[in-house]
Image: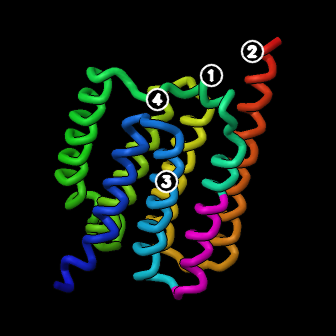
Amino acid sequence: MQELITYLPLLVIAGASLILFLNVNWRWNVIALSLQYVGVFWMVLSFWPVGLAAVKLVSGWMAGAIIGTTISDSDNDKNFSDSSPKEEIRFRIVLWIVIMLVIFALIPGISLWIPISNQLLIGSFLLIVIGLLQLSMTIQSYRIIFGLLTVLSGFEIVYAGLEDSVLVAGFLSIITLGIAFIGVFVSHKKNEENSI
């Protein structure tokens, strides 16, 4: 039972990363981003006190709220399709499974360099790789924001296992919110230029 509880945040992060990677409706992406930060909070909680780990949760939820409240229905029509083509979804699912297999194969070697538990390494590297793939497979502004936040949350898990600095936790929280604000601003500027 205890082992199931330790792997539950990994399942939450894996599910959230799959939803974000599939490029479904923007509402699902905001929900998946919120679930991703619940998983990050849960994983960081094994190293940090509750108050410090809650900083990750609150800043991630605030970033999701910033993104979610700034997407209007007109932006939704321009930037998001309600569903991706079936072939693209199948390709992304197969790619996600291959990434999971590669990460599981590489974790024993990586754990020699980074002295944290394997489930934290799996979760963090899954988020980093999926975020980088999101960044490389899209030109849509909001999807780029989701990719950057995913990469940063994966880095935050690794960093939390190595260092427990309050100052760095605050800086990472500011970076998370800054990515959300700047990404939304750039996206709106891009939409204004396209409408002219």
Q: Name the residue beneath numbered marker 4.
A: 82
Q: Name the residue beneath numbered marker 3.
A: 31
Q: Nearer the viewer, residue 174 or 39?
A: 39
Residue 73 in sight: yes
Q: Answer with mark 3 or mark 1, whichever residue precedes in sequence.
A: 3
Image coordinates for residue 181, horizontal then vertical, percent: 74, 47
Q: Amino acid at mark 4?
A: Asp
Give the CA distance from mark 2 to mark 4: 21 Å
CB-based contact (under 8 Å), mark 1 and mark 4: no
Image coordinates for residue 127, horizontal then vertical, percent: 41, 52
Image coordinates for residue 133, horizontal then vertical, percent: 41, 35
In the rendered structure, which segment of residues is drawn in magenta? 49-62
Which residue is at a point 47% across and 37% down the rendered structure image? 25
Q: Name the residue beneath numbered marker 1.
A: 78
CB-based contact (under 8 Å), mark 2 and mark 1: yes
Q: Residues within 10 Å of mark 2 (few under 14, many from 20)?
A: few
Q: Amino acid at mark 2?
A: Asn
Nearest to the eye among marks 2 and 1: give it.
1
Quick check: 39 left or right of 196?
left
Nearest to the eye among marks 2 and 4: give it.
4
Q: Name the residue beneath numbered marker 2.
A: 194
CB-based contact (under 8 Å), mark 2 and mark 4: no
CB-based contact (under 8 Å), mark 3 and mark 4: no
Q: Amino acid at mark 1?
A: Lys
Quick check: 4 left or right of 10?
left
Quadrant housing residue 140: top right
